[in-house]
Image (cartoon, rainbow, N blue to C red):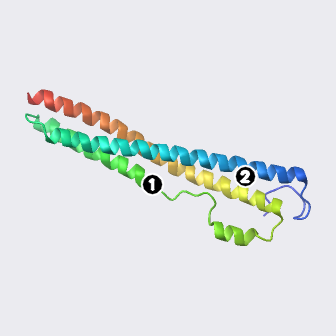
């Protein structure tokens, strides 16, 4: 299957080679931005999980809590920590699917052909990773919402408990 310009593997122009290099550079940048965003999401999820655990310790030390509201706050704090943990557990991102087999398959190919194949592999990895990162971000966002609900329930439990 041909994925790049040119009639045969020996007929690559300088312009086509530059295009292959440009595509690879751009896809590499896009993958790097994805990794950075995922790292930021992990940081936020870790902070939310720590806040949930701290909130649970704070509530546990309180006297005169409204039992139903306090129990609800604890349950939502557990949910918060669980969502943050699930966000942190999402792994298995790709940059170049199966680098060794990619190299073995294309090592004898024309360099420009290899560049276009590499660009296709990076594009596919980006698409695969996008769904993973989206799911990770959704879990992290839900953990923030759950933390806010837990904080409100905890405050209400303290007020109602006298």
In this rendering, the answer to whether 6 lies above or below 105 is above
Numbered mark located on residue 24 in the image = 2
Query: Which image quarter: residue 74?
Result: top left
Residue 71 makes an appearance in the image: yes
In the depicted structure, whether residue 102 falls above or below residue 119:
below
The location of residue 12, given as percent across then percent down, is 89, 58
The residue positioned 38% from the left and 52% from the top of the image is 86
- Of residue 6 and residue 35, the one placed in the foreground of this image is 35
Q: Quadrant of the N terminus?
A: bottom right
Give percent across and percent down for residue 116. 77, 57
Left or right: 40 in relation to 159? right
Q: Which label is found at residue 90?
A: 1
Q: How many marks?
A: 2
Indicate which disc, 1 or 2, sits on the residue closer to the N terminus. 2
Which quadrant is home to the C terminus?
top left
Whole-percent x, y for residue 88 in the image: 41, 51
Taking 63 as reference, is 153 left or right? right
Which residue sits at x=79%, y=53%? 20
Structural distance between the alpha carbons of marks 1 and 2:
26 Å
Apparent side of residue 50 relative to residue 87 in the rendered image (left or right): left
Q: Dot 1, crowdedness within 10 Å: few (<14), some or many (≥20)?
A: some
Q: Nearer the viewer, residue 31 or 76?
A: 31
Left or right: where 1 falls relative to 157? right
Numbered badge on residue 52: none
Q: Residue drawn at (49%, 47%), measured in percent from left and top? A: 39
């Amino acid at each position: 299957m041909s994925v790049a310009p040119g009639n045969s593997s020996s007929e690559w122009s300088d312009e086509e080679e530059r295009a292959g290099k440009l595509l690879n550079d751009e896809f590499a940048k896009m993958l790097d931005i994805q990794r950075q965003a995922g790292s930021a999401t992990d940081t936020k999820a870790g902070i939310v999980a720590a806040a949930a655990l701290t909130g649970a310790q704070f509530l546990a030390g309180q006297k005169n809590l409204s039992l139903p509201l306090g129990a609800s706050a604890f349950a939502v704090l557990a949910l918060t920590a669980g969502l943050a943990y699930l966000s942190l557990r999402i792994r298995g991102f790709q940059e170049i699917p199966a680098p060794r087999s990619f190299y073995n398959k294309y090592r004898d190919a024309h360099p420009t052909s290899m560049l276009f194949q590499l660009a296709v592999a990076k594009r596919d990895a980006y698409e695969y990773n996008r769904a993973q990162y989206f799911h990770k971000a959704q879990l992290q966002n839900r953990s923030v919402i759950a933390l806010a609900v837990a904080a409100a329930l905890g405050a209400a439990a303290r007020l109602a408990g006298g």
